[in-house]
Amino acid sequence: MDEDKPAYRYDARLAGEIELRWQERWDREGTFRAANPSGDLSDGFAAEAGRPKFYLLDFFPYPSGIGLHVGHPLGYIGTDVFGRYLRMTGHHVLHPFGFDTFGLPAEQYAIDTGQHPAVTVRQNAATMRRQLRRLGLGHDHRREILTSDPSYYRWTQWMFLCIFNSWYDPAAGPLGRARPVADLVAEFAAGRRATPDGRPWQALSAAEQRDAVDGRRLAYLSEQVVNWCPGLGTVLADEEVTDEGRSAVGNYPVHRRPLRQWMLRITAFAERLLAGLDDVDWPEHVKRLQRNWIGPSGGPYHLKDWLFSRQRYWGEPFPIVYDEADPTRPIALPEEMLPVMLPEITDFRPVPQDDASDPVPALARAPGWAQVTLDLGDGPRRYRRELNVMPQWAGSSWYYLRYLDPRNETALAAEDIERYWMSPSGVDLYVGGVEHAVLHLLYARFWHQVLHDYGVASSPEPFGRLFNQGYILADAFTDARGQYVPAAEVTAVPGGWEHAGQPVTRRAGKMGKSLKNGISPDDIYVSYGADTLRLYEMAMGPLDGDRPWHTDDITGMHRFLQRLWRLIINVSTGEPLALDPAAPDPATERLLHRTIATVREDFTALRFHTAIARIIELTAHASRLPRVPRALAEPLVLMVAPLAPHIAEELWQRLGHPASLAREPFPQADPALAADASLTLPVQVNGKVRFTIEVPASASRHDIAELLARHPAYPREDVARLIVVPGKIANIVLR
């Protein structure tokens, strides 16, 4: 150890020790567990029952094989800061986390590595879970879900059956609603609804009756012109195809051709999807994107029925079979036969095909799985299973509901639990990137509206408030071929940059795998600690704006934490300093209360970067005092806590508080002390000072003009113009 370095100086080593210790304690004490009103997660609810609830949610992440870069956690840190602030202001906060583990990216990665996707996604989730835990994120880990877990996709299949067994009645309510197909059959039979060709229901054959019903189902089979990708062995949604007509995953050729596929009738909900946008607190540009996608007045401008089939292996099996006597007619399995388990196969690669052949789904390779003997009410019979699987969008369209009651084996979520967390407006704050502004949000809204019609979802919309965080940008470099090279291997040389001795060109872009410019958070933890990384990402700019990453700039946040530490801790002994028990001087007290008032406003509005600036200003002021008053040190630590929770917990404990500060009341400002100081402004009339006026120090020109107009010495007539220099002077020019 460096002999000249104080033993208890706040550095990366000490930060790491503090952070790991507090993360273990939070886990051990269940600090961030949110109690349900009933069920197996209800312990501690009595203590929370009187608090306002708040459901805080991050966009559902896919666990990448290479782990996180520092751009990924931007939104996660932001929601954690806000969630911690909410707990300290008396809220009962639900902040869960899980992983979207089905779908093409996970399967393709498993194919590339030769490892089964079930193993791959769990390993990837473990890596991501470790990296996020190291950030100190306050999630309720008991609620973690993986979409590829049978206990989860059993309910995805259940919801597909709800949709399959529904039709949309446009006459039910102002904008219509989903109803059971049994109601449709009853209306046909009673003559209250005309059959497709006008004949009485009883005059139709059994097959014609079935056609009349199947033609109205919200989930149906139809021949559609689709994007067929032989290289991936599956059809692709439009958003999975590049502008060059190739697959976004793997860059394979894509061909347009007709195929019989599962579809969901989302177009029936077009008017309702449009109308619902008026009732949510979302960014206007996101609402505009959704409205443009749906089309004016609900017409299918971009909106088409949802292509819901994939021919791959790694997805939810459909709870559908076909009778050998009528091989094209889908038969829904009863609920008690769920989940339909994905079979275990070792060769999950797509079946090699050309552009003209009919797709052969990967599940066709599963020995003995395609044919099954079942008793569906008329004795054991032989059936063929549906070999397609659902797309990745299926599991991510409803995951926010399963977080509420993840261990429930008899319902998607208990009714009282769902209503407690989701009423009246759904998720209270949903945070994620704008790249999902249309499709994920549109599909989730459609899925939710069906569940609302069936009384499963209490709110008419899933996400009451939406916030799009920005991106972290970083330098990227291309070689002479235009190919990106690893930014970490680029060196600066006179007049430019080089990689492996060859000149490269610097470009700017979003940090990520494709540009080879990612920076692992693990490296930042080792060099500075997690609290420094949290602070830096929040201080870089507005949460909804893009910001460039500069590793050298992170030292500024580290120095701030070192200064905060030195205010309270003797870096030679590690013991707390003797704080001043007396009240702060008047100027310090005013600054403290103005800071508290501003920080509360900034946290509430998610303006973390400006809150940090005010906290740094207060810390700098405190460091200039001969002794730091305890009445200043304690509220300062509490204000830092949502942003840099580990060092704040450690300082709080060393200040004599043994319990965690996670639910310690956030400081309150004294309005009288928080008010802006006033100043005396001289007022001229035609260039000569005639009187003075007291105005707030921060008063604008408009504010000063209003105060002048009410002053008894203000001339009521013949005022040509008013010249105001805030903080300096006002001049009234008469005609």
Image (cartoon, rainbow, N blue to C red):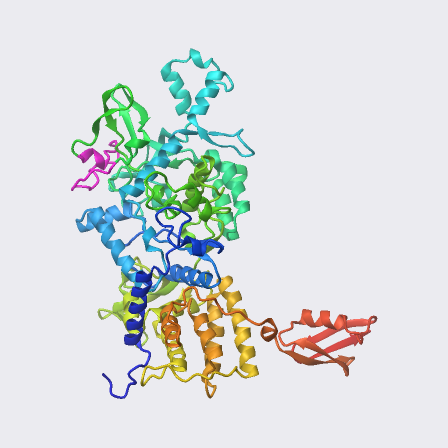
Outermost residue on the right side: it is 717
- Asked where in the image residue 593 lies, by quadrant, the reply is bottom right
Q: Is residue 346 magenta?
A: yes
Most foreground residue, 574 or 714: 574
Residue 395: x, y in percent? Answer: 34, 43
Q: Is residue 278 visible?
A: yes
Most foreground residue, 667 or 282: 667
> Which of the image's four quarters has the C terminus?
bottom right
Most foreground residue, 23 or 63: 23
Residue 396: x, y in percent? Answer: 36, 45
Q: Is residue 528 above or below residue 219?
A: below
- Asked where in the image residue 694 lies, by quadrant, the reply is bottom right
Q: Is residue 229 visible?
A: no
Q: Main secondary structure of the magenta part?
A: loop
Most foreground residue, 102 or 592: 592
Magenta span covers which residues?
A: 341-366
Q: Is residue 396 magenta?
A: no
Residue sitting at x 40%, y 42% = 414
Outermost residue on the top side: it is 203
Residue 446: x, y in percent? Answer: 44, 39
Give the tally of numbered discs. 0
Q: Is residue 696 above or below residue 47?
A: below
Residue 263: x, y in percent? Answer: 37, 33
Outermost residue on the front side: it is 46
Residue sitting at x 46%, y 68% = 609
Q: Is residue 470 above or below residue 448?
A: below
> Which of the image's four quarters has the N terminus?
bottom left
